[in-house]
Amino acid sequence: MPDQRFFRCAGPLRLDEIATLTGSEIAPGGDSARLFHDVAPLDAAGAEHLSFLDNRKYRDAFRASKAGACIIHPDIKDQAPAGMALLLNKRPYRAYALAAQAFYPAGAPPGRVAPSAVIGEGARIAPDAVIEAHAVIGPGAEIGPGTWIEAGSYIGPGVKIGAGCRVGPQATVTHSLVGDHVRIYPGCRIGQDGFGFAPDPAGHVKVPQLGRVVIGDGVEIGANTTIDRGSGPDTEIGAGTWIDNLVQIGHNVKIGKGCIIVAQAGVSGSTSIGDYAVLAGQAGVAGHLKIGAGARIAAQSGVLRDVPAGEEQMGYPALPLRQFMRQIATLKKLTKKQ
Amino acid sequence: MPDQRFFRCAGPLRLDEIATLTGSEIAPGGDSARLFHDVAPLDAAGAEHLSFLDNRKYRDAFRASKAGACIIHPDIKDQAPAGMALLLNKRPYRAYALAAQAFYPAGAPPGRVAPSAVIGEGARIAPDAVIEAHAVIGPGAEIGPGTWIEAGSYIGPGVKIGAGCRVGPQATVTHSLVGDHVRIYPGCRIGQDGFGFAPDPAGHVKVPQLGRVVIGDGVEIGANTTIDRGSGPDTEIGAGTWIDNLVQIGHNVKIGKGCIIVAQAGVSGSTSIGDYAVLAGQAGVAGHLKIGAGARIAAQSGVLRDVPAGEEQMGYPALPLRQFMRQIATLKKLTKKQ
Amino acid sequence: MPDQRFFRCAGPLRLDEIATLTGSEIAPGGDSARLFHDVAPLDAAGAEHLSFLDNRKYRDAFRASKAGACIIHPDIKDQAPAGMALLLNKRPYRAYALAAQAFYPAGAPPGRVAPSAVIGEGARIAPDAVIEAHAVIGPGAEIGPGTWIEAGSYIGPGVKIGAGCRVGPQATVTHSLVGDHVRIYPGCRIGQDGFGFAPDPAGHVKVPQLGRVVIGDGVEIGANTTIDRGSGPDTEIGAGTWIDNLVQIGHNVKIGKGCIIVAQAGVSGSTSIGDYAVLAGQAGVAGHLKIGAGARIAAQSGVLRDVPAGEEQMGYPALPLRQFMRQIATLKKLTKKQ
């Protein structure tokens, strides 16, 4: 059902292929050899489609669905409509993601360097890398195997980009070392000078920014997001961290592994964020702070102090969630009394 | 008076031409054939200029103005200085906008494809479209009549852009269907993957984003704004909606007709916003919500629940305006007592 | 120590050279002719490095440092480790900035116009200016001596850019007059239409934006920041103002000299901001306001009224700092009583 102008389906896939690649179990009665041609949501799926149920809100849609196959949690297999093949998995959304990746593989086009691309002296480009139209690769840069530099992107001198990455279109990456399987979205700005200067009424004096940006494997960085390089130490983004659009990461920030940073959030310079922490949309964290592993900062909240590991905070200045909620309730109650 | 390096005036225009194109009435005594050479603000205008009054704050400037002609509300025509030609209109600012458009028409340069542009196989470009230097048009894309793709913009494979649009410079549009008379500003990112993944400590698993962005006629989308494509359903922007700079629109969001979304606001995934709603600057709306038609969200406010049609909300979490104001007042009063 | 793939050190420099260029005094015992090869932080510096101490928090690191030379405030010269050459300066961070600039000069590459750049008719480009690959310079634009237009940047028709500037990569500048020594970061959008229209349910009517952006000398404008041109009056950025990434500046805004505007802050149309004012990260200022000289707006705060000169404000709506702090304390106390 996806628009064929934009998406090419690699189906059909056999039920047992799908089971294997998603780590699911075929419920009794399922025909291993049955072919499925596409993925579809529960309410739109037909006999040739694979669907999934991950959220209780959609149980009615599940019971009424005409999907040929469905990935579900084992606990609800008894509620399935007759004739639906079931793939049992304790994390159905994750399994669906893997299946959908198989139906719609994300591969780059075959390796080539567009004639209009400009390649600097001494740049090393893996033979199967793709460099699209009007891209510019600086002198001495390295582009790893299978990496795809989209149209108009700029990779600065000496930058190293690993294997299986995708950059752009129209992203800029300078002063950076980028791992494998990193995805940098359109308009991203990575590696420019941080906001470092000695304030002076006679003219703020720029402090040369002599660090880099070091990005781990499997990182995603959203459209028009900005990540400044370090001032001396590096700015670091840990493996598997996902960053959404229009996020600002200041110089010298250290972000751990597997973090989730939602759109328009901002992290000021020299702050560190522990593994698996979450910053919701438009959240802000002041500079030189430590946000513990697994901490969760609510949308639009503003963090002005260190946050202990695992703690959820909300508000401005941000407070532990329960405390924030009690303050909200207190103000509401006192207002009614006035 | 506009700087002639940047703006070319199409004047002079006759008073009656201006009256016709703005839907205004010439007040008694006005000379229909009198020529006006340019527009100007009340305090700077001379005898050859057209000006307007839309705001009570500027009545003194109006009374002292030397403008040759002025667009005003009929109610205040008796306050005009002697000798000023008056164009009477109940919406003077709208009428001024139409007149200024006539003095400074926004037309594209004559149709041509720059030699450095790269046009993909099977792309269909209307004969009078303009494709500027270093633009890239993907295979199978369609560019409608009179549409102007500015320097360095990227139109992805299969994208359809209607008639009379203007895109860029340096915007990217992929996986999208764009209506007529749409204006996409520099650095806009439209159609990239939404922020969709199944969280997993072993590595978040990407969910292929299989929808599109569908943009109605007459939409404006500001500089460096980001609009992600749908995950399966489409992301939709209704006809006549105006979006300012640095706005984030998540995947699957549905925005109605004629909405106004001010700079740095953000709308999280799968939220719907009714016709003519307004989000002020830096406002945020959480995901999976319904914002009713004509609702108004104040600047920097954070919406965490559905908002009824026509309601004005403010604060974080956002509350109906009056309730927010009462809370502010209560806290102020209680603080004084402490 | 900076990564030599990205940074080229111009050292060594003699101690007395460093003293002269930073305006520092060599403390008794310092060997004027001693050579220093690089800058380094206190804890990593060796005998051949210059370091600095600006913050009491690092005094222990200072006492234990093996740096060959250090820039310090005269008051603490007695705490220096034996053998360390001391440069005495009342503003050590500023002096360090100047020294680091000498070790890592920011000069542009030698003047040239890349073959893939597109230069419009009548554009005037100083002989020693640099125009990189795929840049586009519009007809009639002027690029001053020593100015460096990086890859893929777009300079619109008639735009004037002064001497010693650096733009891009992939920035767009239209309808603007830019002073000398201005730095415009990657993805900046300067001079596009402001968000100006007459609201109308039948279709908002665009108001032609007939002003410019006028940028003073020594301004820095961060990555992906957007500055709209005026609607008739100009948008103005005063000399020496520093603007961080992802900032929004609306049309007709006037920003004074030496201001500091931190990432993701936003200033709505027609507001004026006095000299040396500071907007911290994610702060927002409504339209048509006057923010006095030297005012300081805290991070994430939202200003809805004029702010007197020199005043510090915080919160939403923003209040004088002490008042905001008292309200926070009151709410905390009352919540405990509930």
Image: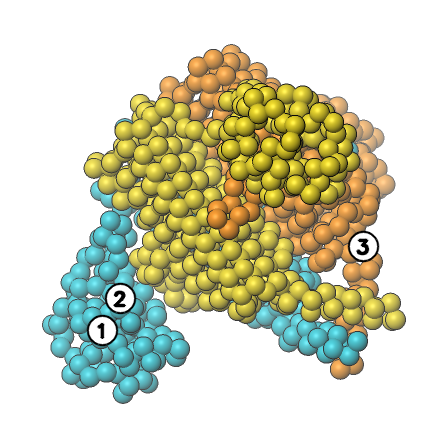
Chain colours: A cyan, B yellow, C orange
- The residue carrying mark 2 is A40
The amino acid beneath tag 1 is Ala
Q: How many marks?
A: 3
**Outermost residue, front side:** B28
**Outermost residue, left side:** A33
Can the viewer see residue B95 in this picture?
yes
Element class at badge 1: loop
Element class at badge 2: loop
- The image position of residue B146, as x and y in percent, is 35, 32
Badge 1: residue crowd in 10 Å (few <14, some 14–19, many ≥20): many
Viewer-side residue, B28 vs A245: B28
Which residue is pictured at 14% across the width and 75% down the height?
A32
Evaluate if marks 1 and 2 touch, with contact meaning CB atoms under 8 Å apart: yes
Q: Which mark is residue C320?
A: 3
The chain letter under disc 1 is A
Q: Is residue C178 above or below residue C224?
A: above
The amino acid beneath tag 3 is Pro
Query: In the shown orientation, is residue A48 left or right of residue B119?
Result: left
Query: In the shown orientation, is residue B71 left or right of residue A190?
Result: right
Q: Is residue A234 above or below residue A307?
A: above
Q: Which mark is residue A67?
A: 1
- The image position of residue A35, as x and y in percent, is 14, 68
Query: In the shown orientation, is residue C283 left or right of residue C323?
Result: left
Badge 2: residue crowd in 10 Å (few <14, some 14–19, many ≥20): many
